[in-house]
């Protein structure tokens, strides 16, 4: 599998148990683990060693590796990517969009010829909300395998609900001793860098008469928004500059080929820090992420 450039931001040190696991995995493989457990590192390692019919689903909109913050991504077999816009940094901000996005990306992976799909969801597992999100994600995706990374009471509670499910194999792995512990400040910096890289070649786009999906605020200026085709795939995403006379002005990278069907506004305003210098002005700097 050709893993996109974004996945190679650290050197992976495999755990001895990983080699024995890889040959038994096929179909939909759901990885579960708390933050800083090494779950995402394991997902990249498994996908990198899969065959040409392997896909990797990046289900963390807050710490994305394929698209900008607020998106879920799919690394397709043989290269290429697909993105879904959820417009939120955590599943709790957009649970329905996150769950539907995960399912649609999984279906797209199999439609593209994948035989094995490694699903790397976000590490949201703490508390009742986290456990419920993991439970519903597993129900929606119907995995053939669950790989649980680390010994954690929250993971045990989730897995206990699926221990007797027909056709599902559960594998337990220790947390990697080489897993990097990233602080909230480090995660925030990562989001800022991802967004700044995404917006590096942004240009104003005029969208007269474009349909509006979801909850559209009365004053959308400054919000992050996604421009999507008729099937809901992201063409581009950026910051709304203005909305007047039925025309939306969006500052975003060039759109992918395809016909724009609608624009959806996210639930955060990234501010103007990540925008190209030509579009910054005094007094416009503000908090980048909540």
Image: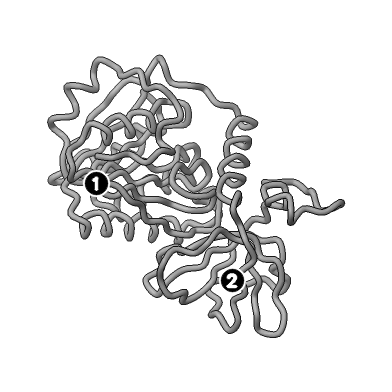
* Relative depth, front residue between 172 and 128: 172
Q: For mark 1, does the 10 Å Cα neighbourhood hold few (<14), some (14 to 19), or many (20 or more) residues?
A: some
Question: At 40% across and 28% down in the image, what residue appears?
Answer: 153
Report, in whole angstroms, how far the alpha carbon at label 2 lies from the one at label 1.
Answer: 36 Å
Q: Residue 94: x, y in percent?
A: 51, 57
Nearer the observer: mark 2 or 1; the answer is 1
Question: At 22% across and 43% down in the image, what residue appears?
Answer: 54
Please indicate whether residue 6 sits to the left or right of residue 243 in the image. Answer: left
Please indicate whether residue 249 sits to the left or right of residue 140 in the image. Answer: right
Vertical comparison of 16 with 72: above or below: above
Quadrant (top left, top right, bottom left, bottom right) of the N terminus:
top left
Mark number displayed over residue 215 = 2
Observer able to see residue 290: no
Q: For mark 2, does the 10 Å Cα neighbourhood hold few (<14), some (14 to 19), or many (20 or more) residues?
A: few
Vertical comparison of 5 with 17: above or below: below
How does the figure colour the protein chain or chains? one colour
Q: State the residue position of label 1.
A: 78
Image quadrant of residue 171? top left
Please indicate whether residue 71 sits to the left or right of residue 242 in the image. Answer: left
């Amino acid at each position: 599998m050709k893993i996109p450039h974004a996945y190679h931001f650290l050197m992976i040190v495999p755990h001895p148990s990983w080699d024995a696991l890889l040959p038994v995995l096929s179909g939909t493989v759901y990885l579960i683990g708390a933050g800083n457990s090494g779950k995402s590192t394991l997902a990249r390692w498994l996908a990198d060693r899969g065959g040409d019919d392997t896909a990797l689903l990046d289900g963390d909109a807050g710490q994305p590796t394929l698209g900008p913050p607020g998106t879920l991504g799919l690394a397709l077999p043989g290269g290429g990517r697909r993105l879904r816009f959820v417009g939120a940094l955590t599943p709790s901000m957009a649970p329905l969009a996150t769950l539907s996005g995960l399912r649609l990306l999984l279906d797209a992976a199999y439609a593209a010829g994948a035989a094995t799909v490694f699903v790397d969801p976000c590490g949201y597992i703490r508390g009742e909300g986290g456990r419920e999100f993991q439970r519903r994600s597993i129900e929606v995706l119907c995995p053939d395998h669950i790989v649980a990374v680390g010994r954690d009471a929250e993971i045990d509670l989730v897995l206990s609900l699926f221990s007797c499910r027909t056709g599902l194999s559960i594998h337990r792995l220790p947390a990697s001793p080489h897993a990097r512990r990233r602080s909230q400040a480090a995660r925030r910096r990562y989001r800022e860098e991802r967004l700044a890289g995404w917006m590096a070649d942004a240009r104003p786009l005029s969208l007269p008469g474009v349909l509006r999906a979801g909850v559209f605020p009365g004053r959308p200026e400054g919000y992050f928004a996604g421009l999507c085709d008729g099937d809901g795939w992201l063409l581009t995403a950026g910051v709304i500059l203005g909305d007047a006379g039925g025309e939306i002005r969006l500052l975003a990278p060039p759109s992918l080929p395809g016909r724009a069907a609608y624009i959806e506004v996210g639930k955060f305003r990234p501010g103007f820090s990540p925008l190209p210098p030509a579009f910054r002005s005094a007094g416009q700097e503000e908090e980048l992420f909540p």
